[in-house]
Image (cartoon, rainbow, N blue to C red):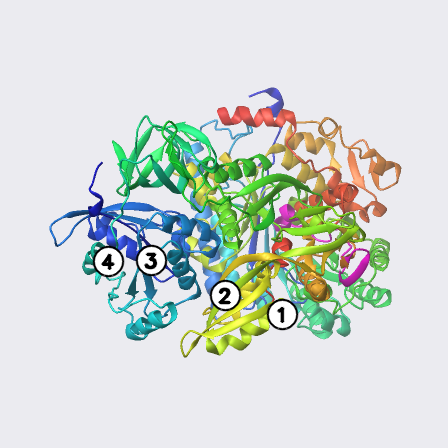
């Protein structure tokens, strides 16, 4: 395929969650006839059920729109959709790197949000032309002119040309397509130079192996070429190249300026990592494209098969997910409380939730997840440094010289009425305020430095609950910092339940210990013996609750409707006695592991 | 059909028991975790009775159709036994339980009794029991019930101590309870049970002794004495877990139990099940079905059935129960999917579903052991082989129950195996020994073969 570069436009849509990015993308597809309206599932580009349900785009999709502009020429508009969440910042930045321009979609009822800003900065980093679009003008609460001013004041870009659209109703879409042709620059790259192409996404296909989504910056690539991935240094023979319209459409070759896909019998997504540079093995380009980063897990948790669930099934499912997700890692681990399971690493909390939900929905598995944790840097007295992400592996306190924890910079945007509430929750979570700025008269952005372990615990729930859902959060890793951290262990009937251990700041340990004990008391059923629940730091018990005993060893009533239930009861008792010899004695319902993570609304 | 299979009568045969659940109460008692509630509208009990009558009719229609279809056939079910609908399976016990059946209006009770006869072939000596509470048992109701053929009454007395009745959250008082009993006797009721409860919060041996004495003096035909069970969902469970109430210590609770055992034995009552005592010949025929693996049909909200060797439960949700009946479907949980599996069959009824989905034989055997051990007669070897076509000793060869015999908790005779009175205190543990974790090899093979067939 050899469209003249002046008839190509490569662009992304950036927006805050819910500002209508996916709907707008759908409209553009529809308007250019890429998909018939009747075939459209709502939000075609969000093709995972989960994404559609939550209204967020996690995995990007790319499509090539063919548009006949008013100047009479046929343009190839490559829409590179971006994931809409802070967990996927790196993926967003790579997608943006594949473009010359971006549509900045702002909800004209809401205005600029924390993520809008974060994404704009990412786009500016890539020198993109940013073209603002005011969406949702059909809503009665829309105030586009104020939002237009807000964009100019807050972001500092010209919004005077920003069109008014309603993606939902399809108004202003025609004009927007013209604007794209007009305002987004055409790509410029030397077709005759050695191949230089960016991987901005990849996915696994059962039949073709890994499908790489790429933007060609220089040169051209065709079927049969031997390509080299410059960072992983792997070499493959190209089996297919094509464009996305929006389904895959094989073409003869992809040239500078174009966006498309490459298949090369690659077996794992991690072998074709986003950000890597593709070149030809026999005629390589000199320098790879800048910005390549290895996927870095920030948040970890244990995933265990629930009672009655098969370990192998969970393993198979995790393997399948990993093949498709370079940022997700797992390795086997064993817990005395939960048996055999896996330690999993994620980009962030949302990423973790997504993986867990996919296990449950797509694979129909029942799993237990343990408290999320971050990576701590533990410096031992003998000078050895360890990076520890599983609280169970925390060394004995007497061996520790000090511990460092990851600190993030959190930007929180909120209507000004909730500033007080936010300060309260940030302070309660060891946040240090860096500054606060008024974005508009009514909206404020707060900048905090905060430990990541506080952010992943219940910060997001607290933020949503204390700002009635209006607060938005964005965060970025800053540095490791020394902190007075302790390992909080939970003992049930004097036996430590490793899966409930967590690392907390010494100042919060008592409060957290009391909270966890109280929650556990609510969910652990009565046994035939008293069950003490204790929270301790090392040998020191800092909180205690007791689940009373219910001890009868005789079933007084057993009639028709009771039989199955009583049989189960006897089996449970029998099982309990057997387990008593193995580990502990207490039946811990699965909800206990999640109950201790829930945001406590009574807490400040 | 092998000779061995032919010898097994199976758990589907013999006369059927029918249970009808009436889920209404004037007030929920503090110990109660049963499916019962205060009616939300004045006519709710009446409408419910209509649904129950509809459910009986459905059963009858389907069973008769099934019988007609299988008449003359040597149809055999999965276990090689004759499958036979209750269209011609005689019914020798009917039990109205609750809840509070006596809360229904006399005409509704009469209508239901009438409907039972219309839908099921009751034997001449059929035992017909109604559970009552003293408060709602008026004379007119007693007369209606007797006229309708009720021949056994159960009174939920629980205690005659005013303090105890208050603790339990009962609505009646001592005088009302005594009067209900007297009224029943005067009206001619010949078979009366009194329900008692002990070991509830604050209960003492002395008060218990007074209750026992006073109740025995009334000369009821049957006494059920239940140690308080903390049922999940009951007020007592919540209060106890939260530490708001206390219960007698286990030792004290067991002492109260044995106090009742000794006293009632001394007054000539036969201790025939863990919590049940009867005068000569007055053991409850209906309840015996639960303990000896005999078939019973449970009708009404949330009621359970063991029918054609399969176990079912009705919807416990009133809306779903009602909806199923309005659609002329049996209100049984999961029956739709089972009926779907049998879609080719023109009779999507319980008989069809049951014949296709019997409780696995090894589970039936385990349940037999668990429930039979509740009774004084215990496990009977001859009964076991008649029901299951296998020898008890061979099936439970691997279970080390002899250790209980050595400790005096079980006793073995030529006929079978039963708990001693001391063994009752350890009954959960002993019964659990007979519950296998998985299907034995021979049964797995058997079920495989059946599936292929």
Pointer 4: residues within 10 angstroms few (<14), some, or many (20+)? some
Front-most of A505 and A462?
A505
Q: Which chain carries label 2?
A: A
- Nearest the viewer among A16 and B32 is A16
Whichever of callouts 2 and 4 sits on the residue coming sooner in the sequence is 4
Residue A478 or residue B177, whichever sits in front: A478
Residue A562 counted in the magenta span: yes
Out of B40 and A456, give the one closest to the viewer: A456
Stretch of the chain drawn in magenta: A537-566
Q: Please give the residue where the numbered disc 3 appears in the rendered image.
A: A21
Direction right: furthest residue: B407
Number of other residues with Cα within 10 Å of mark 1, as a class: few under 14, some 14 to 19, many 20 or more: some
Q: How far apart in space, not on screen, are marks 4 and 1 (Cα)?
A: 47 Å
- Comparing marks 2 and 3, which lies closer to the viewer? 2
Residue B344 % position (x, y): 37, 34
Callouts 1 and 3 on one subunit? yes
N-term mark: 1 or 2 = 2
Q: Which mark is residue A428?
A: 1
The residue that label 4 is drawn on is: A183
Please provide percent x and percent y for residue A19: 35, 62
Q: Distance between the residues labelled 2 and 3?
A: 22 Å
Q: Which of marks 1 and 2 is in front?
A: 2
Task: Find disc 2 in the rendering and name its residue.
Answer: A411
Q: In which quarter of the image is the C terminus of chain A?
A: bottom right
Which residue is the extreme one toward the left?
A72
Give the position of the N terminus of chain A as an image quadrant: top left
State which mark lies toward you, 4 or 1: 4
The CA span between labels 1 and 2 is 16 Å
């Amino acid at each position: 395929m050899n469209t003249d570069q002046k008839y190509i436009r490569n662009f992304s849509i950036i927006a805050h969650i819910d500002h209508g990015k996916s709907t707008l993308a759908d409209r553009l597809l529809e308007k250019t006839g890429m998909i018939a309206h009747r075939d459209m599932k709502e939000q075609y580009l969000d093709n995972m059920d989960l994404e559609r349900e939550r209204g967020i785009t996690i995995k990007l999709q790319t499509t090539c729109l063919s548009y006949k502009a008013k100047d009479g020429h046929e343009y190839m508009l490559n829409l590179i959709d971006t994931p809409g969440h802070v967990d996927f910042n790196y993926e967003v930045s790579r997608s943006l790197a594949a473009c010359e321009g971006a549509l900045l979609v702002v909800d004209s009822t809401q205005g600029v949000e924390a993520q809008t800003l974060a994404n704009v900065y990412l786009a500016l980093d890539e020198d993109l032309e940013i073209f603002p679009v005011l969406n949702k003008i059909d809503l009665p609460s829309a105030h586009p002119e104020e939002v237009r001013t807000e964009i100019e004041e807050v972001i500092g870009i010209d919004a005077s040309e920003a069109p008014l659209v309603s993606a939902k109703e399809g108004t202003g879409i025609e004009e927007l397509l013209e604007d794209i042709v007009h305002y987004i620059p055409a790509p410029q790259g030397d077709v005759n130079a050695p191949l230089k192409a960016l991987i901005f996404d990849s996915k696994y296909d059962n039949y073709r192996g890994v499908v790489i989504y790429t933007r060609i910056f220089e040169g051209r690539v065709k079927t049969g070429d031997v390509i080299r991935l410059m960072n992983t240094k792997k070499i493959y023979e190209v089996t297919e190249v094509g464009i996305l319209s929006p389904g895959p459409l094989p073409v003869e070759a992809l040239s500078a300026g174009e966006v498309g896909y490459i298949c090369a019998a690659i077996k794992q997504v991690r072998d074709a990592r986003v950000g890597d540079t593709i070149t030809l093995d026999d005629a390589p380009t000199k320098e790879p494209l800048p910005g390549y980063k290895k996927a870095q897990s920030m948040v970890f948790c244990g995933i265990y098969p629930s009672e009655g669930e098969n370990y192998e099934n969970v393993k198979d499912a995790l393997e399948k997910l990993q093949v498709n997700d370079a940022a997700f890692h797992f390795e086997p681990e064993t817990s005395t409380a939960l048996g055999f399971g896996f330690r999993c690493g994620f980009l962030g909390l949302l990423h973790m939730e997504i993986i867990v939900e996919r296990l449950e929905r797509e694979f129909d598995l029942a799993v237990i997840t343990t408290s999320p944790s971050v990576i701590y840097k533990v410096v031992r007295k003998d000078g050895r440094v360890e990076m520890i992400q599983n609280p169970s592996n925390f060394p004995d306190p007497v061996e520790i010289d000090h511990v460092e924890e990851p600190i993030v910079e959190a930007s929180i945007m909120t209507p000004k009425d909730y500033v007080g509430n936010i300060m309260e929750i940030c302070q309660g979570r060891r946040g240090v305020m860096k500054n606060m700025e008024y974005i508009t008269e009514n909206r404020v952005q707060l900048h905090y430095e905060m430990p990541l372990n506080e952010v992943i615990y219940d910060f997001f729930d607290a933020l949503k609950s204390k700002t009635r859902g209006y607060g938005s959060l964005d965060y970025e890793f800053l540095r490791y910092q020394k902190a007075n951290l302790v390992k909080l262990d939970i003992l049930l009937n004097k036996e430590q339940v490793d899966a409930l251990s967590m690392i907390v700041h010494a100042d919060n340990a008592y409060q957290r210990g009391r909270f966890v004990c109280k929650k556990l008391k609510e969910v652990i059923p009565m046994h035939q013996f008293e069950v003490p629940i204790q929270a301790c730091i090392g040998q020191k018990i800092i909180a205690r609750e007791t689940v009373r005993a219910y001890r009868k060893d005789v079933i007084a009533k057993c009639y028709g409707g009771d039989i199955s239930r009583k049989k189960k009861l006897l089996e449970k008792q029998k099982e309990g006695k057997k387990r008593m010899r193995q580990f502990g004695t207490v039946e811990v319902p699965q909800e206990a592991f999640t109950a201790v993570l829930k945001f406590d609304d009574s807490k400040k | 059909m092998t000779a061995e299979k032919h010898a097994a009568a199976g758990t589907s045969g013999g006369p059927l028991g029918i249970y009808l659940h009436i889920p209404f109460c004037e007030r929920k008692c503090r110990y109660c975790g049963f499916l019962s509630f205060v009616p939300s509208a004045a006519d709710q009990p009446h409408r419910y009775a209509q649904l129950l009558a509809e459910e009986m009719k459905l059963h009858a229609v389907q069973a008769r159709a099934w019988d007609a279809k299988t008449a003359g056939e040597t149809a055999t079910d999965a276990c090689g036994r004759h499958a036979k609908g209750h269209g011609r399976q005689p019914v020798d016990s009917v039990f109205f339980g609750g809840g509070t059946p006596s809360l229904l209006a006399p005409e509704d009770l009469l209508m239901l009794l009438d409907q039972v006869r219309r839908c099921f072939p009751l034997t001449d000596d059929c035992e017909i029991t109604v559970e009552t509470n003293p408060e709602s048992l008026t004379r007119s109701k007693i007369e209606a019930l007797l006229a309708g053929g009720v021949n056994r009454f159960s009174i939920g007395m629980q205690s005659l101590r005013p303090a105890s009745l208050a603790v339990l959250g009962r609505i009646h008082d001592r005088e009302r309870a005594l009067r209900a009993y007297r009224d029943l006797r005067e009206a001619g009721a010949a078979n009366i049970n009194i329900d008692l409860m002990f070991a509830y919060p604050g209960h003492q041996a002395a008060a218990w002794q007074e209750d026992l004495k006073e109740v025995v003096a009334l000369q009821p035909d049957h006494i059920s004495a239940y140690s308080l069970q903390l049922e999940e969902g009951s007020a007592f469970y919540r209060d106890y877990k939260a530490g708001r109430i206390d219960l007698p210590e286990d030792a004290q609770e067991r002492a109260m139990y044995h106090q009742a055992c000794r006293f009632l034995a001394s007054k000539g009552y036969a201790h025939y099940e863990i919590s049940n005592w009867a005068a000569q010949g007055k053991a409850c025929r209906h309840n015996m079905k639960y303990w000896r693996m005999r078939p019973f049909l449970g009708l009404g909200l949330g009621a359970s059935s063991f029918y054609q060797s399969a176990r079912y439960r009705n919807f416990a949700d009133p809306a779903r129960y009602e909806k199923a009946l309005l659609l002329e479907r049996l209100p049984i949980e999961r029956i739709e999917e089972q009926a779907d599996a049998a879609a080719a069959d023109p009779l999507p009824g319980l008989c069809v579903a049951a014949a296709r989905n019997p409780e696995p034989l090894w589970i039936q055997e385990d349940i037999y052991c668990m429930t039979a051990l509740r009774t004084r007669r215990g496990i009977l070897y001859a009964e076991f082989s008649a029901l299951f076509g296998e020898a008890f000793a061979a099936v439970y060869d691997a279970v080390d129950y002899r250790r209980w015999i050595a400790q005096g908790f079980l006793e073995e005779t030529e006929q079978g195996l039963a708990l001693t009175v001391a063994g009752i205190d350890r009954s959960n543990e002993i019964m659990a020994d007979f519950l296998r974790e998985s299907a034995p090899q021979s049964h797995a093979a058997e079920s495989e073969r059946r599936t292929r067939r």
